[in-house]
């Protein structure tokens, strides 16, 4: 049988406890509704919070990897755009050289052809010297990517290891200047690193196979493991390498005709590099697409763990709000119960 006491009000204590529970539940529902998250701290779900934290780190990493891939695509696109211009210049040089190989052109005509070819070669060199991407020289052969032979690595994954990297090979960043296209990487030149000069008509050596005696246009220092240009000269040092080749080629139809082989090799070099860039662009784009899919899956999984269900939390909020009001009303009633004892005195 329940007794009437003054010192201990059990009904009040029960009402207080239920009021506290209702208030806590309503506050939790309110927090989840305002933040949109079911887990706002470790106490909400310790295991879920740990898993969600790892997933959020992965999501952030995928964002960076996606950005890395996009930057790689921009780098390749920049290089391809300049190579397209170089290719168009080489094609024009070939057309002019084929004209010069025709015996119907006199001295003045050959001089006019020579002037345009020299200007176009100078422009190729200028473009290759100035084009860069975030400080990386793309086409003059001076970048670490080219000199080291390691190329550039595009980080397209969250972790270390080769599986998370796409390597853009060093050949993409080799020099596309006239020196490289017509000599260093040219099949017909033998890659000896020096320009060509004419020989006397009495000699049997092909005009473009006779090399400059005791003088190279660009000297190289291999002490650091790569070819570093340390000097440039032609004969007495007053004639540039482009002037030298134009002097050697655009003199008569025979030398112009022979030079067509060198131009074709140069065009093939640029075309192959452009094709390789296209292949790499497709690969990087595929990697970026894969990153997007992976990130989407992780985001979905993290959402199921961390995000709040608004419908459920709204119902919880209303439920605990009603319970809070009810508990508060009953607490007020329970607090009045000890006063009944006064009627017995």
Image (cartoon, helix red, strand yellow):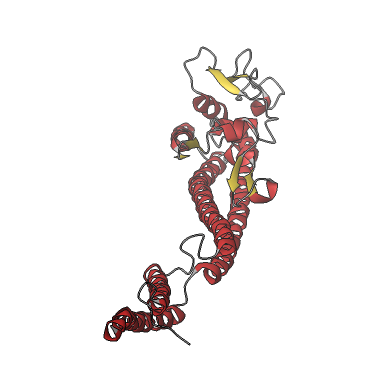
The residue shown at (60%, 58%) is 287
Q: In this rendering, would 326 be left or right of 200?
A: left
Nearest to the observer: residue 82 or residue 168: 168
**Residue at image coords 48%, 31%:** 107
x%, y% of residue 306?
A: 51, 67
Location of residue 88 in the rendering, given as x and y in whole percent from the top left corner:
50, 48
The residue nearer to you, when weighing 156 against 218, is 156
Residue at (43% x, 80% y) in the render: 316
Tell me, yes or no, if residue 36 can be seen here. Answer: yes
Q: Residue furthest front?
A: 345
Task: Classify residue 172 by image quadrant.
Answer: top right
Viewer-side residue, 61 vs 166: 61
Is 281 positioned to the left or the right of 35 in the image?
right
Vertical comparison of 214 with 229: above or below:
above
Task: Point out the image quarter for the C terminus.
Answer: bottom left
The percent coordinates of residue 296 (x first, y second) are 55, 67
Q: Residue at x 39, y 67 (%)?
A: 35
Please tell me how many numbered marks the rendered image carries: 0
Q: Is residue 217 visible?
A: no
Q: Is residue 142 above or below residue 269?
A: above
In the image, 245 versus 279, the foreground residue is: 279
Percent of width and height locating residue 224: 63, 20
């Amino acid at each position: 049988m329940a007794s009437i006491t003054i010192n201990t009000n059990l009904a009040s204590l029960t009402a207080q406890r239920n009021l506290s529970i209702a208030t806590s539940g309503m506050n939790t529902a309110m927090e989840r509704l305002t933040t949109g998250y079911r887990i706002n701290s470790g106490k909400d779900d310790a295991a879920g919070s740990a898993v969600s934290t790892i997933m959020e780190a992965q999501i952030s990493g995928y964002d960076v990897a996606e950005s890395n891939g996009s930057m790689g695509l921009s780098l390749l696109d920049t290089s391809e755009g300049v190579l397209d211009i170089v290719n168009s210049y080489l094609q024009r040089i070939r057309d002019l050289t084929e004209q010069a190989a025709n015996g119907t052109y006199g001295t003045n005509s050959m001089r006019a052809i020579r002037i345009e070819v020299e200007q176009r070669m100078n422009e190729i060199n200028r473009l290759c010297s100035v084009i860069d991407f975030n400080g990386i020289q793309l086409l003059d052969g001076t970048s670490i990517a080219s000199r080291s032979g390691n190329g550039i690595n595009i980080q397209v994954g969250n972790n270390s290891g080769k599986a998370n990297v796409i390597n853009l090979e060093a050949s993409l960043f080799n020099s596309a200047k006239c020196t490289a296209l017509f000599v260093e990487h040219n099949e017909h030149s033998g890659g000896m690193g020096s320009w060509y000069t004419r020989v006397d008509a009495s000699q049997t050596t092909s005009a473009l196979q006779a090399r400059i005696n005791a003088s190279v246009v660009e000297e190289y220092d291999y002490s650091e493991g790569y070819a570093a240009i340390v000097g440039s000269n032609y004969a007495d040092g007053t004639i540039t390498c482009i002037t030298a080749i134009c002097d050697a080629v655009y003199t008569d139809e025979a030398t112009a005709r022979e030079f067509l082989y060198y131009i074709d090799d140069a065009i093939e070099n640029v075309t192959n590099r452009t094709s390789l860039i296209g292949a790499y662009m497709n690969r990087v784009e595929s990697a970026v697409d894969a990153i997007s899919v992976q990130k989407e899956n992780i985001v979905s999984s993290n959402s199921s763990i961390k995000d709040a269900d608004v419908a459920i939390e709204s119902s919880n909020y209303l439920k605990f709000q009603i319970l809070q009001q009810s508990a508060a009303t009953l607490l007020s009633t329970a607090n009045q119960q000890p006063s009944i004892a006064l009627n017995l005195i």
